[in-house]
Amino acid sequence: MSTTTLKIEGMTCNNCAHHVQEALISVPGVEKADVSLAQKQAVVVSEGPLDLSAAVQAVEEEGYKASLT
Ligand SMILES: [Cu+2]
């Protein structure tokens, strides 16, 4: 189990947060993603170390930006 906190840019409402959460959960190995609109971040729980490039790409495909905090 591994927990990674990502900074998320571009979210303006809860719908955005939901899109980011769905994107992160679609990344192989990810078990849980808690996205906070207010804190502009996502806490991602994954089976092993998070595949960071896959996570960043999935978030970018939804139109947002993710980076390590
Ligand atoms: Cu939105």
Image (tube, rainbow, N blue to C red):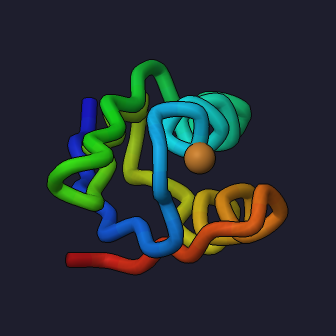
- Image spot of residue 10 (x, y percent): 52, 71
Closest to the observer, 69 or 2: 69
The furthest residue to the top:
31
Q: Residue at x 44, y 74 (%)?
A: 9
Instruction: Say how many tags the image has.
Output: 0
Closest to the observer, 23 or 46: 23
Classify the position of the N terminus by image quarter: top left
- Image spot of residue 31 (x, y percent): 47, 20
- Image spot of residue 52 (x, y percent): 52, 67
- Tell me: residue 1, above or below residue 61: above
- Tell me: residue 12, above or below residue 63: above
The furthest residue to the right:
61
- Image spot of residue 48 (x, y percent): 40, 40
Q: Residue at x 45, y 53 (%)?
A: 50
Q: Is residue 29 visible?
A: no
Q: Quadrant of residue 3?
A: top left
- Tell me: residue 23, above or below residue 58: above
Classify the position of the C terminus by image quarter: bottom left
Q: Residue at x 31, y 77 (%)?
A: 68
Q: Going by the image, does 3 lie left or right of 35?
A: left
Q: Is residue 42 visible?
A: yes
Closest to the observer, 23 or 50: 23
Q: Going by the image, does 44 lie left or right of 54?
A: left
